[in-house]
Amino acid sequence: MAQKKDDRVRNWTFIVYPESAPEDWIDKLAENQVPFIISPLHDRDTTPQGELKKAHWHVVLVFSGNKSYSQIKDITDSLNAPSPEKVKDIRAIVRYLTHIDYPDKAQYQKNDIRLCGGVDIDLDSYFLTKSDLKQIRIEMFNYLSDAEVTDFCDMVDYARKYKPDWYDQIVMSDHLMIHAITSRRHKKRGI
């Protein structure tokens, strides 16, 4: 017997149009007790032919567990919104809210993104570029060398107290940092 495909995911997105949504659509969404993200009003988007698209908001629902299409469809129907879509990559969809990775599209401000319902994301970290991350890692390794850090806990404590951007990177990917510090400690001891 064929196994039923699970259509459940943690994050969903949909569009809300000002002219068809209830006036209190944000309150209605909040009543669902769901953390959600609202884009700036996209009122300058154009079609490939250069015509102005209808103004709209992108909404991202951020659940702690998986939800099915039908569960989300009930929510979008209550807002007169089009069908929801699964979010494949939360970072990509959050960045899309401003079109930062799409220079040919109208650009919107990160500061106009609204985090609602207790959504727990560090918005700034979603907008770091590879260049930003590279610079942060260079700073971290320079400090590691200059301060002769030989224990991972010392690096974590320093970052936690004085360098939140470093701390975020350590927490997200500590493997390389642990090896660098262990190597430094062994080198210092002549092991």
Image (tube, helix red, strand yellow):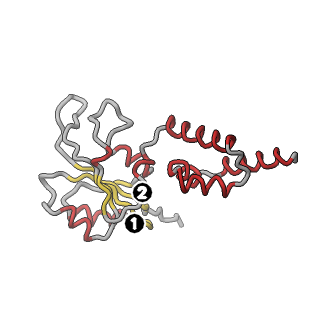
Which secondary structure, mark 2? loop
Q: Which mark is residue 121?
A: 2
Task: Decide which of 40, 131 is in the foreground and name it.
Answer: 131
In x, y percent, where is residue 150?
73, 50
The quadrant holding residue 68 is bottom left
**CA neighbours of label 2 inside 10 A, class few (<14), some (14 to 19), many (20+):** few
- Depth check, mark 1 against mark 2: the one in front is 2
Q: Earlier in the sequence, mark 1 or mark 2?
A: 1
Amino acid type of the residue that numbered disc 1 sits on in the rendered structure: Lys
Label 1: which secondary element: strand
Q: Residue at x 69, y 51 (%)?
A: 178
The type of residue carrying mark 2 is Ile
Q: Which mark is residue 67?
A: 1
- Residue at x-position 51% and y-position 48%: 165
* Rendered view: 138 above or below 175: above
Residue closer to the observer: 46 or 113: 113
Q: Is residue 151 left or right of residue 23?
A: right
- Which of 173 and 55 lies nearest the eye of the viewer? 173
Q: Residue at x 23, y 37 (%)?
A: 45
In this rendering, position of residue 69 left or right of residue 153: left
Where does the image place residue 14, in percent across and percent down from the top left?
Answer: 29, 54
Are the residues flagged by discs 1 and 2 in contact, CB closer than 8 Å?
Answer: no
